Amino acid sequence: MRSEIKEYQAVEEAAMKFVKSVAEGNSKYAKELFTDEAVLFGYLDGKLEHGSIEQFYHNVDTVSGGDHFKARADVLLVEESLAVVRVLEEGWGNRIDFTDVLLLLKMNGEWKCVAKAYNQNSNTIQKQ
């Protein structure tokens, strides 16, 4: 059964905690969104990042979004207790464009992110 529009809005509001953290370079808001057990998968400048969401927090806390950072969140799917959000990022750290996919579950009435996978746009990869 398709969820009501208000549920899509609740998912979008939750995902915007992710965007706010990235934009401000402060993991505080993302920590409200992600579960402690959340995982991260993706390649940053060609190097695989995987494991605990703590790596994401570290990245956010050490690099702010930057002066020209832009982002949007698209709620792709909401099915009762499951949601998928795509976040498009441009200019993170004044250099990198990402596409993030967030997997959320509704837990105790609140949308929480359990996994983040991402792609760094190939034209923004810095060779090491």
Image: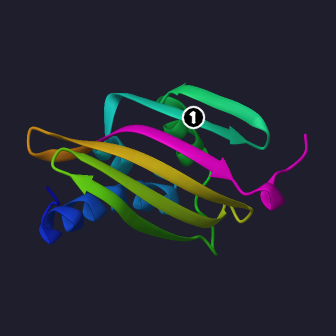
Q: Is residue 114 magenta?
A: yes
Q: Quadrant of the N terminus?
A: bottom left
x and y, in percent, of residue 30 in the image: 37, 47
x and y, in percent, of residue 22 in the image: 50, 56
Residue 89 higher or lower than 40, as above or below: below
Residue wearing tag 1? 41
Horizontal side of residue 73 vs 104, given as left or right: right
Q: Is residue 70 visible?
A: yes
Q: Is residue 90 magenta?
A: no
Report the number of numbered marks.
1
- Span colored in magenta: 113-128
Horizontal side of residue 4 vs 87, given as left or right: left
Q: Residue at x 48, y 30 (%)?
A: 54
Given residues 22 and 119, the one toward you in this image is: 119
Q: Residue furthest left?
A: 109
Q: Residue at x 9, y 45 (%)?
A: 109
